[in-house]
Amino acid sequence: MSAHLPPLVPIVFGSTVFAILGYFFSLVLGSRKNWIGSSLILLALAAWLVLQGILSGTGFYLVTDSFPPRFLCMVVPPILLLLLLFVFPSSKAWMDQIPGENLTYLHLARIPVELVLYWLAMYGWVPISMTFAGWNFDILIGLTAPIAAYFILNKPISSKNWILFWNIVGLVFLLNIVILGILSAPGPFQKLSFERPNTAVFQFPYVWLPSFIVPSVLFAHLVSIRRRFVAS
C-alpha cells in the first residue's frame, strides 16, 4: 500500500508542469511572433492537460487489464503530434527558428521532476529503480543543461559536436527511464518491480509526466539534434 504523500510533492510537480507550459508559450511566441496563433497552441496544450487530469481523476488509467492498454491514451497522441511536426515544412521551419540555448534550458525541468520521483519512491508510489538512487540518470542532463547552453551561446561553432553528443546522451537517458517506467507499471508489459510497481503515472497529477513532460523534453532533444544537421 502506497503511503499518503505530503502536499509538497504534488505542489512541486504541478509547478514544474505549469512552468514548462509557460516556457513553451514563450518559445512559440518568440519564434512565431503571433499572439493569436501562440495563444491557440497554449490553449490546446492546456486542454490536453485538463483531459489527462480528468481521465486520471476518474480512475480511467487504474484499469490495467484492458486491451489495448489504456495508458496508450496518454502517450500515443503526443507521439503522433511530434511525428507530424517533423513532417510538415511549416512546422520544421518554425522549429528551426527556436534558439538552441532556449531548447536546452527546458531540460532544467528534469531536476525537480527527478526530486519528485525520488519522493514518490520514498512513499512507495514508484520503484527506487526509477530514481537517481537507482537506474535513472536523467538528473545529470538537468544539472548540465546550463553548461550546454553556455557553450551554445559562447562557442556555437566549436561546440557543435559536443552539444550533439549531450543531446544524444539525454535522449538515451530519457529512453531508459521511459522503458523502466513501462516495465514497472501494472499491466501487460510489466516485467519489473512487482513488489513496488509504478502506480504514480496512472494518477493525478503524475499522469502529466508521461503525457506532457516526457514529450516536452523529447521535443527539445529532437529539435536540437535536427538543427545540428540542418545547419551543417
Image (cartoon, rainbow, N blue to C red):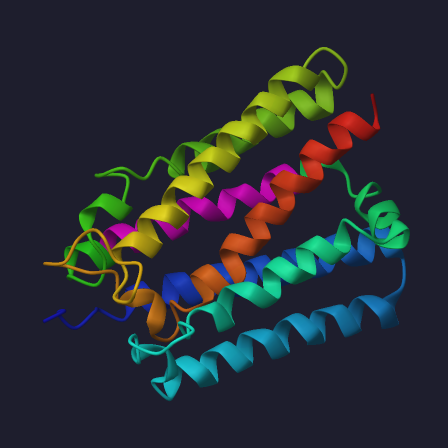
Give left or right: position of 214 versus 207.
right
Q: Position of residue 104 (x, y in %)?
A: 62, 37
Q: Position of residue 109 (x, y in %)?
A: 49, 48
Give left or right: position of 120 versus 26.
left
In the depicted structure, whether residue 96 falls above or below residue 120 = above
- The residue depicted at 75 percent of the width and 57 percent of the height is 84
Quadrant hosting residue 79 = bottom right
Whether the magenta-drawn stretch holds residue 107 is answered as yes
Q: Position of residue 156 (x, y in %)?
A: 75, 19
Quadrant hosting residue 135 = top left
Q: Position of residue 35 (x, y in %)?
A: 86, 68
- The residue depicted at 15 percent of the width and 61 percent of the height is 124
Q: From which residue to which does the magenta span run?
A: 103-119
In the depicted structure, whether residue 165 falls above or below residue 124 = above
Whether the magenta-drawn stretch holds residue 151 is answered as no
Q: How many marks?
A: 0
For the residue pair 160 and 31, the one nearer the viewer reads as 160
Give left or right: position of 23 versus 179.
right
In the depicted structure, whether residue 229 falls above or below residue 107 = above
Image quarter where the N terminus lies is bottom left
What predominant SS class does the magenta segment belong to? helix
- The residue depicted at 80 percent of the width and 66 percent of the height is 38
